[in-house]
Amino acid sequence: MKPATKNPKTQKLETRIAELENELEQLKARNRQLTAFQQVSQAISVSLNVQQALDAILEQVASIVSFDSATLILVEQDHLRAVAARGFSDESLALNVYPRSSQNSAWRVVQNKKPLIVADVQNVAGWESRTGLEHIRGWMGIPLIARNQVIGVLTLDSRRPNTYTPADAQAIFLLAYQVAVAIENARLYRDTAQRLGDLRVLHDAGQALVSTLDLDEILSIIMKRACGALSAEYGYALLTNEAKTRLGFAATVGAGAQRLKGQTIPLVGSIMGTMVKQGKTLLINDTASLPQFFAEIDARVKVDTHLLMAAPLKTKGEILGALLVTNKQTGPFTQNNLNLLVSLAQLASGAIENARLFRQVQQYSQNLEEAVVARTVHLTAVNVTSRN
């Protein structure tokens, strides 16, 4: 028995119904995207803290594309730093630093300024397998672009291979613009707040320094202000001797650091000596590159130095010494941190020069007074003798 032939009108109607259902699904998907964009905008507008906004952002991302874990990675000069993560058993394990590499998937996103989909990371030769990331199979990286520059990458992970599609990438790419705006606004707010804070620190330090001409008090004030403003665990003010052959620990901050006060180190053969002689700054956040000099300091203070910054003390072309701070307690030292330390060193250099001039004037006055007394005694003796 032949199957019944559908009426052409019926076929046309069914085809149209299918088309309308497909259009309806597309409209629903688009509506979900628009809702997500609106929710992300609201999350951004109420918080200038990326960490706080991330949960709301990822909640909306999940309404468009499913994921098992996600990471927010920011571009920092020659490396990428994961600053926030969600969905990991231990989120701290996902907060890694990735040096520049053409093999790294996130770096490829930065270089190409386009989304990248990896069907299965276990089949990618350049994939870096790290502790806590073993569950990742499917992966997608979306560039965060602000002012035509890639400032970061939003990565989505799946436990299943072949999870993500170009359509998923395009949908999140549109959303990523608002994420980039949030990050850029947060950075601008943070930088502005930091500059205001730095100016306040410099103003307060300047006010404190003009109240004294005592060298020891000057160095103590400046090191306490430096360590407080930079969240440094230890601080040292080092001054050159008159012969410019050694550096002496003139002021210290931190538990056990007082053991170094009064001790000296040679300028020749130490990285601090080289830095002081050349009048250069120093910023080291990599423990592997710390020189032996700091191992010797650590042994004396009984502490492990893993982060450090130094700025020279100099005035009128003369090198006076250096300010050194170590072990920032809130993350790595930054260029802005170094700029503040340099400004504090400039303040200190002027105060040190004034204190030394004051000492010279005091010494000259004392010498003059002693000379006058001696001359008066001599003249009195001569006068008495002449009378007799």
Image (cartoon, helix red, strand yellow):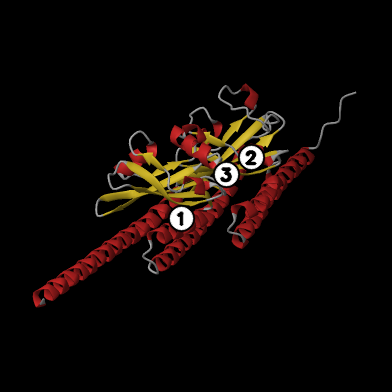
Which residue position is annotated with label 1? 223
Q: Locate the C terminus by quadrant.
A: bottom left
Residue carrying label 2: 168
**SS state under label 2:** helix
Quarter of the image that includes the N terminus: top right
Three-letter code for the amino acid on which mark 1 is drawn: Met
Q: Answer yes or no: is residue 319 visible.
A: yes
Q: Residue at x 16, y 74 (%)?
A: 380
Could you tell which of marks 3 and 2 lies nearer the N-terminus?
2
Separation of disc 2 and disc 1 at Cα?
A: 53 Å
- Expressed as whole percent of the image width and height from the top left, the position of residue 282 reads 40, 43
Query: Quick one: label 1, few (<14), some, or many (20+) residues within 10 Å?
Result: many
Q: State the image coordinates of residue 53 (x, y, percent, origin top left).
A: 63, 54
Disc number for residue 296: none
**Left or right: 255 as drawn, with respect to 310:** right
Alpha carbon distance from label 3 to label 1: 47 Å
* Residue for badge 3: 173
Count the labels in the image.
3
Q: Earlier in the sequence, mark 2 or mark 1?
A: 2
